[in-house]
Image (tube, rainbow, N blue to C red):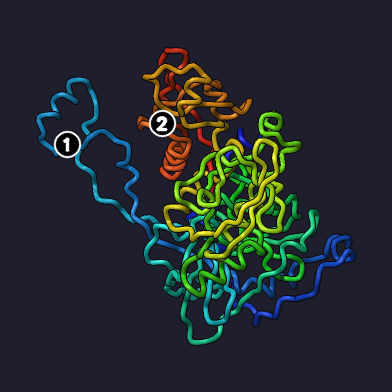
Amino acid sequence: MGNHRRSRLIAFGAASVFALASAAAPALAEPSTQPHSAEQSNSSMPQSFAPLINRVKPAVVNISTTELDSSANRNQLPQFAPGSPFEQFFHQFGLEVPHQTMPAHPLTALGSGFIIDPSGIVVTNNHVIKNGTNIEVTLQDGTTMKAKVIGHDDLTDLAVLKVSADHPLPYVKFGDSDDLQVGDWVVSVGNPFGLGGTVTAGILSARGRNIHEGPYDDFLQIDAPINQGNSGGPTFDRNGNVVGINTAIFSPNGGGSVGIGFAIPSNLAKPVVAELQKSGTVVRGWLGVAVEGIRPDMEDALGVKSTNGALVASVSPDGPAAQAGLKPGDVITKFGDKPIHRLRDLTWGVANTAPGKTVTVSYLRNGESKSDSVTVGRMHPQQSAEAASEMEGGQPQVGLEMQAITPQTREQYDLPRNVQGVLVLDVEQGGPADRAGVEAGDVIEKVDHRVVRSPRQVYDQIRSARRDGKKSLAMDIERNGQEQFVVVSLPRSNQS
């Protein structure tokens, strides 16, 4: 994890749909539904992937979008019109005069996608088409069609598009990502750096990776080289079924692939894609809690014997959990009949529960086992934003564990009455915050020059800075009565 935090994650974002610009291919054969077998996984290296590529390549497409870029004017000084009396002031000190904002100009972003239905249903990453207009899909034979967004989901970074053709289109099917084993061969097709029609092969390197992009992170890690421009494109198993949707790469310097890529598992994507295709949106359950992981040093204080479970950090007033009697400090051990081993067990369990359904929640309070019935609510956009900010667990993004200042913490940490902000409980050794000089016991007063009063506000400022393409952000900190100013580097989530 230390190396992971020190390097850059590149989400293949709005610049990566698998473009295929080669000669016309034969009709697409049905992907095999043959189940995984030990014989397959242990077989020798295939002589060629050509038969597989010939079958699936026609269904992989290039996606281009046009979006307005005003970033050149973002974070600048106030703008002055030509001839302003302020010009003389700037000239006096040899400074460039910041004139009025120039009109935003269009940029073209490229990404990848794949067709899952002959009627023209296309799957890609949400970040490929987000903020874009004039979305176009280009087939392998060079045919370009306008695409309409049917639905998109920020929390899983998935989007579904629709194109119309006068004939059935080649398509591929989702496979079973749970059937894929570490060490199995995988193949990716895509449009890295706009080159088009690029095929790479490798193996599944690991499962269940959390790269702190959202509350439902559960990525496949692959070593098939994928780069910027690959976002939204498919990773296939040896039977030609889509087992992953390429989304991000890990790069020490923010550049190209070093053999660590991340793909959304097909079993995570399938129900989301189906719901987007049906209704254009995703309905999720909502519990109304902010949770975090349990560290070994917490066990005695919480009265637990392992790091399994989800610690309730806060409870939304009048939310389902509050109405059922859950309180901050409770450790949720089971949701329904499913044990909670890690945070994602709870976030996915709640999200996949139909709103209105009553579920038994088991938890520990001061070491004592309890259970209550909770009627799951519906997650609305505001709760979605809270989920993205709160239900990540651990020490996301910059290596900080934080807590809002309460009367109890103010007394416990002997904080002066006039100190306001967010208390730093722990700093990950070697993480971005640690390298910037942040220490446990510091109080973060401002992030990027904005006042913060809760961990969620800190996370929101970090995400905002990353979306704006910033490489670092400033923090105003109070430490033992002294004001401190630090600059924290931001791990990039480089989107392919």
- The amino acid marked with disc number 1 is Phe
Badge 1 or badge 2: first in the primary sequence: 1
Q: CA distance from mark 1 to mark 2?
A: 27 Å
Q: Answer with the quarter of the image where residue 185 lies.
A: bottom right
User: Relative to residue 249, is residue 369 drawn left or right?
Assistant: right
Residue identified by numbered label 2: 447
Does residue 437 appear anywhere in the picture?
A: no
The residue located at (56%, 68%) in the rendering is 273
Specify whether 56 is left or right of 48. Answer: left
x, y percent for residue 467:
44, 45
x then y, percent, for residue 246: 61, 57
Which sits in the foreground, 240 or 197? 240
Q: Residue at x 46, y 42 (%)?
A: 463
Q: What count of labels does the image hold?
A: 2
Secondary element under disc 1, as helix, strand or loop, is loop
The image position of residue 471, as x and y in percent, is 47, 35
Of the two numbered discs 1 and 2 in the rendering, the one whose residue sits closer to the viewer: 2
**Callout 1 touching callout 2 (CB < 8 Å):** no
Disc 1 residue crowd, few under 14, some 14–19, many 20+, Cα 10 Å? some
Q: Which residue extends farthest top?
A: 481
Identify the residue position indicated by label 1 in the image. 80
